[in-house]
Amino acid sequence: MNASIIGQMAVSGALMGLVYALIAYGFQLTYATSKSINFGQGELVMISAFFSLTLLNLGVPYWAMIPGGLLFGAIMGLVVERAGVRLALEQKSEGWILLTIIIGLFFFSAAENIWGRDDRPFPTPISADPIHVLGVDVTRLELSVAVGVLGIMGLIELFKRRTLLGKAFEAVSADRDAAELMGISATRTVMLSYALSGAVAALAGILVSPITTVGPTMASALILKAFSVAVVAGLDSGFGVVLIGMFLGALESLSSFYLGSGWREAPGLILLILALAVRPTGVFGKAVIRKV
Amino acid sequence: MLLVEDLHAGYGASEVLTGTTLQVKQGTLVALIGANGAGKTTTMRAISGGLKPNKGRVQLDGKDVQGLDASRIARLGLAHSPEGRKVFGPLSVEDNLLLGAYSRLPRFFGFRGKAQADLDRVYELFPRLKDRAKQASGTLSGGEQQMLAIGRALMARPKVMLLDEPSMGLAPVIVQEVFRTIRRLKEEGITLLLVEQFAKSALEVADYAYVMERGRIAVEGTPAELSRNERVIAAYLG
Amino acid sequence: MKRILLLRGTELIVFAGLATIPLLVVNPYALGLLTLLAIYGILLIGLDVTVGYLGQVNLAHVAFLGLGAYTAGLVVTKFGLGMGPALAAAMAVGLLLGGLLALPALRLEGPQFALATLSFAALSTTALNELESLTGGAQGLSLNRPPVFGHVLTPPLFYWLCMALLAVVWMLMRNMLSSQWGRAFEALRDSPIATDAMGVGTYRHKVAAFALGSGLGGLAGALYAFNFQYLQPQSFTYDLMIILLLGVVLGGRKSLWGAFVGASVIVLLPNLLSNRHLFQIFSGLGFAMALAAGVRGLAKKTTRPFQALAPVVAMGLLVVGGLFVENTEDWRKAIFALMLFSVVVGLPEGLMGFLSIFLAKLFRVPHAPLPEPSDIETILPPRPADGAPLLVIEDLKRHFGGVKAVDGLSMTIKSGAIHGLIGPNGSGKSTVVNVISGLYTPSSGRILLRGNPLPSGSLYQVSKSGVARTFQNLQLFGELTALENVMVALKGVYRSPLPLVLMGLARQEERQAQADALCLLDRIGLKDEALVKAKDLTYGAQRFLEVARALARKPDLLILDEPAAGLAHPDVVQLIEIIKRVHTRGISIILIEHHMDVVSELCDAVTVLDGGKVIAEGTPDEVKRHPKVVEAYLGQPVQPETGSGAEPLPA
């Protein structure tokens, strides 16, 4: 087997894997503040992508569409928090698992009816011509994925470190009760984490749609892999998701090539179950001490 | 400044506080002492909002605050340094201090400038914190974390400060240092409610003291009155 | 007797009624629906095991339906075998694969568990699609219903088969849930830590439950295959999984009737959606109910505003949708979502949950009479208290990161003694006890029970070694009665293997367990509260119940972790009495306490901890006067004073 073809597949796959990493990063944001994640995040990616497509079709220029799409994602994130998460958190139950699944289902159905069931192309000014970098061919489009993912993650990390609100975010993640004693509203911080998670999901949709097209089925395609990345890396692992995301993407690309496209999903899923079996807190995650 | 009337509070089926009444006048240091399990920390939590009281009243500077969210009560001028200190481990010493003043500072940029004066004051009180300003607070020793917790509460420029078991888990030498600091704060006119397991140390610094037993105040008085009171000693070991 | 007659009677009538239907109803479509009802009934009973009894979101169940269906299909088409082997194989596949999935998955917390099941479902779909030579892939698999005992299964006969299987499954589950298994499931929901500490392996019960539920899913799958006689992987998707969840939640969790009601709803759903008129009536009804419940909840202040209003909004959307939307079929997912949302938020106990509260108010059915309490001598025979070392701790250390919670503790508990463990807050007492009982592993050091190393790091293993404990923060099984709390922990009574339990042949040991538990409650003074749910007991009674529960373990060593915490004085007196009575049985006790009067009155020996180290040891009187103890509890003054620091305290 030609080594350069393998390398090619691996690199392309790894760049796609960054999208999974981005969605997983969104999970980490909400998990940090509230120990909850949106099980319907795939649908959120999808409707944000559709919304962004609508903006483009209405004539909004591409670079103006991006903040619009992100804002929409943030708002949807807030909807999920209010309708699906807050009640369960107040009751200290895990009811948000089922509720976020339900909200995701609703979004799916709405998207099907508003935008139709077909996959649609997503126009982009970034060219799909390959350029040669370090021995492999990558398209500018694929590189833009990397730039977008790493860029927004960097921005949010900067926010967390440099602004007081960001520090408050970290404080709530570290110790919710103590943060409340500082006058920080934990509820508002959870809302913020869901808004950020939604915006991040929207960007993932915008980045990936030109390559894979927009359609109702993109939700389920992306979400399981994002879950795999989040869990395998650990829900509190920080940039571990980037590494695992790239690894998973590369693995998928290669298994699709060798085993056939139907088995594309399999390595990720098997990896997930194995990782959960061997190290439930994730490769980079931290262990939890039980208190009695 | 702080008034607590007939406070009832508890966890689930058990009611820990069965009618606690105390007050802290402005500029005084009041001690709340008593044996373990008497309800001292529960009282603090019920005052600062971590626990919602079942009955009774908490008044901060004339305003009723019982039943409000903890973050709301904090913003109204109550600073609580909790049992076990609870510093934000992954964050630096300086970040912890800045967060102490969260309700007063701008959220995005420019907060360091506004807080500089308060930071300087805290560093002057606790020089060791200045040395470790950029260090992750989780790596500090127990005594340093206690200093940080007190400093963090001071950053809020609070109307009333609650200090819960500052000596817990600390070596005696460090405990002495902590109490030296408390004396200094007292000299500066802070209004402070201090919960302590170590009765003697607390009575040394207090202007007034309450002794808790089984969820209510058993005895109260000035330290001089209390140190002669046999009921106090009985309440601890009897 | 009356109660059993009433409950079983209702079931008998319903099943008898269902059995006569093919004789009365000629419409094949209706018969088909009812057949499907039986199949979904079995499926939902299986799903309820994880969703209801274990309280987890299980997204793999639809995969077991599919795997069971394809297994049955392959057994019939590729191996040419009959109905019996097909059903058995489908169920076995469900059991096996369910068990295999459960082993890693059930070690996980809720969200990760849900993800693991979701992945399994996705993997199964992929396998079904890709293993074309076996399954026919996306083209599908056709099969014929095999004859049973030579008879071709006409629709009525097939209907009877499905109903009969439903009745059998119903009976088996009923037997299991009214046995120790049912109690164990409830217990591990209320407090997994206490469940392990009481010798009921949380993990193994969860795995068995999941495997069983999946086995039922497989069985339902086989019947599904024979019902439609055509299979394709696309039938077993995420959408169907949501519908199944809808059925379980709407019908009512933890309830066989709930599964039945839920199955009825699922079966009727497609009709509901295709008939617009029916849909409008239905959504209108739902909206009215949500509004009534919401207003009532707000007025009575039993629900939060969101909980009361959200279902109203959701059902309102359904009503509005029904009026304006052209084709309700297109919006079916949204309709399910809104329905499920309303139920999860507004009616979490489901229809049956709601009905049973209602019916309980109408019909007061007397409880079956309890047996006579056993003799204490048989349950807790007195053991020799010879003063030999029972528990020896050697240089125990336990740290959490930088914090040294226990820093070199050595201690010996003598057989038959009551040994106090005291110290200020943060001194490490609870950590020591948590290490002994197996919640934490030691960082270093040894613990020996009667000369043998005590298992470390496993509450379950330690409880099996003869050590029982109570908890500083109560860990009762709130939803179980006082009697059941003790029954769960009873050692040595439940010997029947699961198959016998399922067939209802373990009744004798149930009666024995009741009698034994009643005796223990009597010793604690809670005999009259035996049938009260633990969460409804007074605080004092709850503390005593934890002691009775620990005694059910028939321990050699009993650890009491602050048993008097928060107790009013009269209850403290009663507690002291109880501990003395336990002591007369020769059971050795480690007592962590703050109340010095309790310690003085009860303890033969006391160890005092401070900062994770032992600072004094001896009799209660010796220890009270020890200067280091005084210093630890009362503290030194800030300025050294002349004289006042080291005075002995009044006794």
Image (tube, coloured by chain):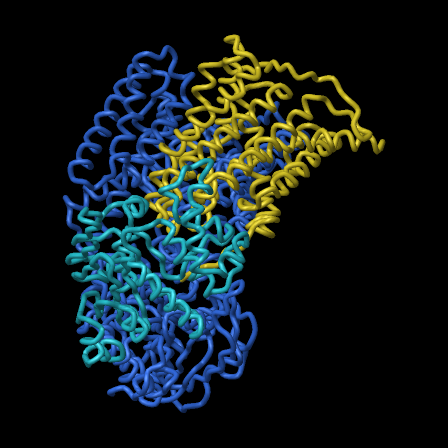
Residue C547 falls left or right of residue C410: left
Chain coloured cyan in the rendered structure: B
Question: Which quarter shows the C terminus of chain C?
Answer: bottom left
Rendering quarter of residue A229:
top right
Q: Closer to the camera, C415 or B213?
A: B213
Residue B34 image offset from top left, x and y in percent:
26, 71
What residue is at 36 percent from the left and 53 percent from the top? Answer: C177
**Residue B220 higher or lower than A269, as above or below:** below
Rendering quarter of residue C168:
top left
Residue B108 image offset from top left, x and y in percent:
45, 35
What residue is at 50 percent from the left and 8 percent from the top? Answer: A58
Residue B59 image offset from top left, x and y in percent:
19, 51
Q: Closer to the camera, B229 or C287?
A: B229
Residue B29 falls left or right of residue A255: left
Residue A255 image offset from top left, x and y in percent:
71, 34
Q: Closer to the camera, A48 or C95?
A: A48
- Numbered disc total: 0
What is chain A's hue in the picture? Answer: yellow
**Residue B165 higher or lower than A46, as above or below:** below
Residue B4 falls left or right of residue C54: left
Question: Which quarter shows the N terminus of chain C?
Answer: bottom left
What residue is at 55 percent from the left and 23 percent from the top? Answer: A217
Chain coloured blue in the rendered structure: C
